[in-house]
Image (cartoon, grey):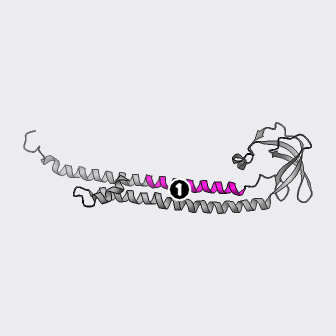
C-alpha cells in the first residue's frame, strides 16, 4: 500500500528512481487484481460449481429412492462409522452396518449389508435406506444446501488462491527489479569507484 501511495508522492520527486515508480505501479496492479479480479474470479467459479452441483443433486434425486428395509441382523463385526461423505456435515454422521432385506422397484426381494442412522437395529426393525434404480444400496443423495455450501467454499478458495498467487507474483517481480537495480549500482561503482578518493593518495 505504501508503494501504491508513492506513485503520486514520487511523481515529481527529483531523487525518485525509475524502479521506485515501477514498483509502485506493480503494487497498484496487484492491489486491483486482489480487490477486483480475485473476487470476480471466485464468484464465477462458485457459480459454475453451484450449477454443476445442483445438476448432480437433481440427477441423484431422480436416480435414487428412499426404500423401507427390514433388519435381519447386525453385520458381522459391525461398528459405527460414517460411510456417506455427505453425512460428515450433517447430524447423520454416525451410521451402523446391518444386514437387511428390501424390495427393488421391480418387486424383486433383495438382501445385503447396508448402513443406517437408526438407533434401533434389532432384527425385524424397519429402517429407511437409499437404493438406485435397480434396487442396489446407494449413498444418500446430496441435498441443495450442502451443494450451496460446497460451491461457496469453492468460490472462497479460488478468491484466496488468486489473491495469494497475485502477491507471490508481485514479490517475484519486485525481487527481479531489485536484482537489476543492484546490478546497475555494481556496474556504476565499478566505473567510478577506483577514482573516488583513492587514486593518487598513496593508499
Measuring 56% from the left and 54% from the top, which residue is drawn there? 156
Measuring 74% from the left and 48% from the top, which residue is drawn there? 84
Q: Quadrant of residue 91?
A: top right
Q: Which x, y percent locates residue 61?
A: 77, 59
Q: Which x, y percent locates residue 60?
A: 75, 59
Q: Which residues are magenta?
A: 141-167
Is residue 65 among the parts visible in the rendering?
A: yes
Q: Is 145 included in the stretch rendered in magenta?
A: yes
Categorize mark 1 by other alpha carbons within 10 Å: few (<14), some (14-19), many (20+). many
Q: Is residue 73 left or right of residue 165?
A: right
Q: Dot 1 corresponds to which residue?
A: 159
Q: Quadrant of residue 177?
A: bottom left
Q: Which residue is outermost to the top?
A: 77
Q: Is 55 included in the stretch rendered in magenta?
A: no
Q: Which x, y percent locates residue 160?
A: 52, 53
Q: Regarding mark 1 in the picture, which secondary structure is present there? A: helix
Q: Quadrant of the C terminus?
A: top left
Q: Is residue 45 above or below residue 85?
A: below
Q: Nearer the viewer, residue 126 or 60?
A: 126
Q: Nearer the viewer, residue 173 or 193?
A: 173
Name the dominant secondary structure of the magenta segment.
helix
Is residue 23 among the parts visible in the rendering?
A: no
Measuring 28% from the left and 61% from the top, which residue is drawn there? 11
Measuring 77% from the left and 39% from the top, which residue is drawn there? 80
Q: Which x, y percent locates residue 5?
A: 34, 56
Q: Is residue 201 left or right of residue 28?
A: left
Amino acid at each position: 500500500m505504501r508503494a501504491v501511495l508513492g506513485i503520486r508522492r514520487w511523481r515529481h520527486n527529483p531523487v525518485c528512481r525509475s524502479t521506485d515508480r515501477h514498483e509502485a505501479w506493480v503494487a497498484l496492479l496487484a492491489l486491483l487484481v486482489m480487490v477486483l479480479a480475485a473476487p470476480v474470479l471466485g464468484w464465477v467459479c462458485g457459480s459454475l460449481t453451484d450449477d454443476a452441483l445442483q445438476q448432480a443433486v437433481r440427477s441423484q434425486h431422480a436416480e435414487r429412492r428412499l426404500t423401507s428395509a427390514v433388519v435381519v441382523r447386525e453385520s458381522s463385526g459391525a461398528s459405527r462409522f460414517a460411510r456417506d461423505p455427505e453425512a460428515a456435515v450433517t447430524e447423520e454422521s454416525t451410521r451402523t452396518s446391518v444386514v437387511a432385506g428390501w424390495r427393488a422397484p421391480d418387486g424383486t426381494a433383495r438382501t445385503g449389508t447396508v448402513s443406517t442412522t437408526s438407533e434401533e437395529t434389532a432384527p425385524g426393525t424397519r429402517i429407511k435406506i437409499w437404493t438406485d434404480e435397480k434396487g442396489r444400496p446407494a449413498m444418500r443423495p446430496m441435498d441443495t444446501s450442502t451443494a450451496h455450501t460446497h460451491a461457496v467454499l469453492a468460490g472462497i478458495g479460488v478468491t484466496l488462491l488468486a489473491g495469494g498467487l497475485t502477491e507471490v507474483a508481485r514479490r517475484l517481480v519486485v525481487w527481479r527489479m531489485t536484482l537489476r537495480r543492484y546490478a546497475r549500482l555494481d556496474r556504476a561503482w565499478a566505473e567510478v569507484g577506483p577514482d573516488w578518493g583513492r587514486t593518487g593518495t598513496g593508499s
